[in-house]
Image (cartoon, rainbow, N blue to C red):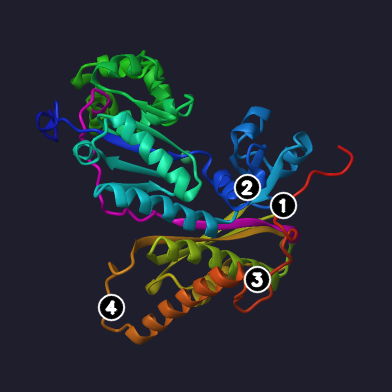
Amino acid sequence: MNDFNIQKYINNERYIALVDCDSFFCSCERKLNPALKGKPVCVVTGERGCVVARSKEAKAMGIKMGEPVFMALRDYPKCIYVTANHYNYLKISKEVMSILQSLSPQVEVYSIDEAFLDVTKLMGVYKKNYFDFAKFVQDKILKEVDIPVSIGVSKSKTLAKIASYKAKTTKERVVLIGKRKIPKALKDTKVSDVWGIGRRLDVRCKTLGIFTALDFTNKDDFFIKANFGKNGLLTKYELLGNAINEVTNEYTPPKSIMDTQSFLVFTTELDYIKNELLVHIHMACLKLRYAECKCKKIGVILKRKDFLCKFLESKLEYATNFELDITDTAFSLLNLMYEKNVLYRSVGIVLEDICNEGDEQLDFFVDEKKIIKSENLGKAIDALEEKYGKNVVKLGFENKKAPNKQGFLTAPKGK
Ligand SMILES: [Mg+2]
């Protein structure tokens, strides 16, 4: 009944670490401005946006993830609110990842603030046990990049996730789940907290009488396959301590990159909307270049005041990560959706069909010189921004005024 050969993986002696940066965006802001250390900090997407990261002090105050900024400002005026700067976060993420890559040949960058490491063979190299090795990695990242991390080590990626989750609640922020500790760890873990199950399958689990990870592993293979498919079975064996999902060095490009934000005021003005769209195209391209990727398809989202949302997408002539290659297509999509005398609340860009730089297939009819010129221009913009600050280079339109000089939002007076 099994599509994959489970026997091949049973009892394989692997140890995998998950390194997860603590409240990553907040930690980055604290690295850049140490005065924020020890204080409640929230990173927000902008004055009209929402909370995207909270320091542990901000969490303790009761601020929720995704809470609209105006509500957080009203209810928690003592917290410090900082506007997100993804450019900085990507740069710091690269510093963390390159330390990990210097320590192990097998590092899988899983997200901006998480990476899996296969540590099986490293113990002999570093002459340390798994726990001490994790502490060593944690200290090194703190000392060299000033970013705190939690590390979970166990016998599969799924268990390493559980271990890192537990690590966040301990003083040492490192948890090792060895072979003998697996059953207890499974018993203590809610099934909804298992990687790959989550809230999506939580309801199904509960109706089947599965509440903990241990309940899940106690079900026989036939039952799991019938109710959760092949991936469910894979999760079961991972939970039992078999590293089926291996750590791969290959970078998986993000599926899509989106950048959008509400306007300061509702508008009917096409030029204003275009201007905003350019800012989003720039931010999205910046993320794409930092990930060393290109996109082959773009989409534009246009939202009306009454929340009615329009979305159109189009293939690009060639894979790119440069603003000017995207602008014309984006503007034509916008023109197709835009209606006069309608009030709009937001516009955004989605970059899709993403591939690694260098993996793109070149068309015979595409002007290669033009592509190289675009690539160089994109890199020049990044270099200028790195040297002189964000938004020194603007395309076409004048950007709207920044919220304030330091990027800090302050609580309303009289509260
Ligand atoms: Mg994290």
Q: Which one is in front, 362 or 330?
A: 362
Residue ID for mark 3: 275
The spot of residue 157 in percent (x, y) is 29, 34
For discs 3 and 2, the disc positioned in front in the rendered view: 2
- Give whichever of discs 2 and 1 has the lower sequence position: 2
- Give whichever of discs 3 and 4 has the lower sequence position: 3
Residue found 63% across the figure and 67% down from its top: 338
Q: Check contact, mark 3 vs mark 2: CB within 8 A.
A: no
Position of 95 with respect to 30 (left or right) is left
Q: Amino acid at mark 4?
A: Asp
Residue found 61% across the figure and 40% down from its top: 66
What is the C-alpha distance between the residues marked 1 and 3? 24 Å
Q: Quadrant of the C terminus?
A: top right
Residue count near mark 2 (Cα–Cα under 10 Å), binned few <14, some 14–19, many ≥20: few
For discs 1 and 3, the disc positioned in front in the rendered view: 1
The circle on residue 34 is 2
- Give whichever of discs 3 and 2 has the lower sequence position: 2
Q: Amino acid at mark 2?
A: Pro
- Residue 185, placed above or below residue 233: above
Position of 148 with respect to 342 (left or right) is left
Q: Amino acid at mark 1?
A: Phe
**Segment colored magenta:** 238-266
What is the C-alpha distance between the residues marked 3 and 4? 31 Å
The circle on residue 374 is none
Residue ID for mark 4: 363
Residue count near mark 3 (Cα–Cα under 10 Å), binned few <14, some 14–19, many ≥20: some
* Residue 50 shows in the view: no
